Image: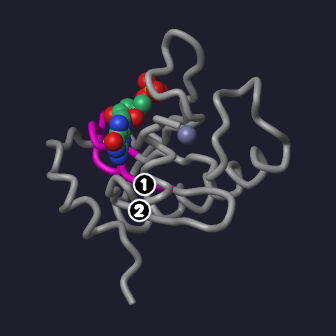
Amino acid sequence: MNCIFCKIINKEIPSYTVYEDEIVKVFLDINPDSNGHLLIIPKKHILDISEMDNNTWKSILEITKKMKILLEEKLHIDGLTLIQNNGIVQEVKHFHLHLKPYYKEAQALLPIEDVYEKIKEHE
Ligand code: 5GP
Ligand code: ZN
């Protein structure tokens, strides 16, 4: 299947991955609206909200809460908006939840590598 997000899951296309487990993957949006703009996707190919099953949705929501804490701790975000597009407003036809951070003070967009360096888990 010619799905860009399946290719990211299979590591055929690189991504700045922040978190992953058997069910979901979280990575930085390549064209961010703000610093730390994340996408949470299911590892199985699900088109949109109509195809989403309750178990996968539950995992995505649990990880959303964890990622909010991560963004607060690592990037000091002041707000977070969740967006999930379907139909003509959905560009990539593999379910994804956008996590878009907001900041009290306007911030210039940093290079994605710099955001990744701040956000990734340090060992
Ligand atoms: P949509 O409009 O489908 O909700 O948004 C798709 C999002 O996927 C866009 O914000 C776009 O920047 C992001 N995107 C598209 N292709 C890639 C890619 O190859 N890598 C990453 N990290 N993000 C992508
Ligand atoms: Zn896919």
Residues at marks 1 and 2 touching, judged by CB atoms closer than 8 Å: yes
Residue at position x 37%, y 67% in the image:
74
Residue occupied by mark 2: 17
- Which stretch did the figure color magenta? 26-37
Magenta stretch secondary structure, dominant:
loop
- For disc 1, does the CB lie below 8 Å from ligand 1? yes
Identified at 71% across, 56% down, the residue is 62
Displayed quadrant of residue 102: top left
Three-letter amino acid code at disc 1? Phe
Residue farthest along the right direction in this orientation = 54
SS at circle 2: strand
The verdict on residue 75 being magenta is no
- The image shows residue 68 at horizontal and vertical percentages of 53, 55
Drawn side of residue 49 relative to residue 1, left or right: right
- Looking at the rendering, which quadrant does residue 47 occupy? top right
Where residue 41 sits: x, y (%)?
Answer: 57, 46
Q: Secondary structure at mark 1?
A: strand
Observer-nearest of 110 and 106 = 110
> Is the C terminus in the top left, top right, bottom left or bottom right quadrant?
bottom left
